[in-house]
Image (tube, grey):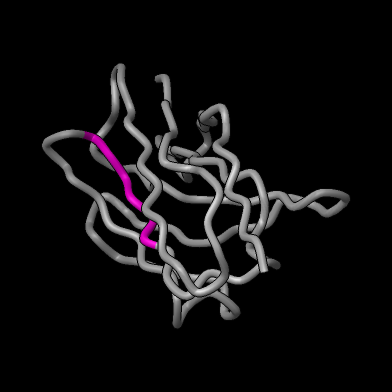
Amino acid sequence: VQLQASGGGLVQAGESLRLSCAASGSIFNNNVMSWYRQAPGKQRELVASITSGGSTSYADSMKARFAISRDYAKNTVYLQMNSLKPEDTAVYYCNLKWGVLYRYASWGQGTLVTVSS
């Protein structure tokens, strides 16, 4: 399975951005697609997830501003980010887990989001 992330860029604080991640290859029905982010000097953190059944979950600090969705026909997951803040600056990675207990995982290459104040 390969993941291709896109949509990052430079925006000003308060603006919005939508990230996309397209998955290709053999994708099994039972899976979860997620967005993680890693800011400079910090550990990678989970931003949001969406299961193949459509259930979503978010990091508490981003729940009010971010929305994850997926297009099943296109095997693509999106992250709509609104009211962006400078502290949202990070490399955003998409992740796909599948299999029993989600034992298999694949990562995208990351897309950089920079929010200027």
Task: Determine which quarter of the picture holds residue 77.
Answer: top left
Residue at the spot x=57%, y=34% of the render?
Answer: 110
| Residue found farthest to the left | 73
**Residue 38: x and y, percent?**
71, 49
Residue at the spot x=66%, y=56% of the render?
Answer: 89
Label count reads 0
Q: Is residue 17 above or below residue 97?
A: below
Q: Is residue 76 magenta?
A: yes
* Quadrant of the rendering where the N terminus is positioned: top left
Residue at the spot x=45%, y=68% of the render?
Answer: 15
Q: Is residue 102 above or below residue 24?
A: below
- Front residue of 96 and 111: 111
**Residue 71: x and y, percent?**
18, 45
The part of the chain drawn in magenta is: 75-80
Q: Is residue 10 magenta?
A: no
- Front residue of 26 and 14: 14
**Residue 14: x and y, percent?**
50, 74
Task: Determine which quarter of the picture holds residue 30.
Answer: top left
Q: Is residue 29 above or below residue 1?
A: below
Majority SS type along the magenta span: strand
* Quadrant of the rendering where the C terminus is positioned: bottom right
Q: Is residue 102 left or right of residue 93?
A: left
Q: Is residue 117 left or right of residue 52?
A: right
| Residue found farthest to the right | 41
Residue at the spot x=50%, y=50% of the render?
Answer: 35
**Residue 49: x and y, percent?**
43, 58
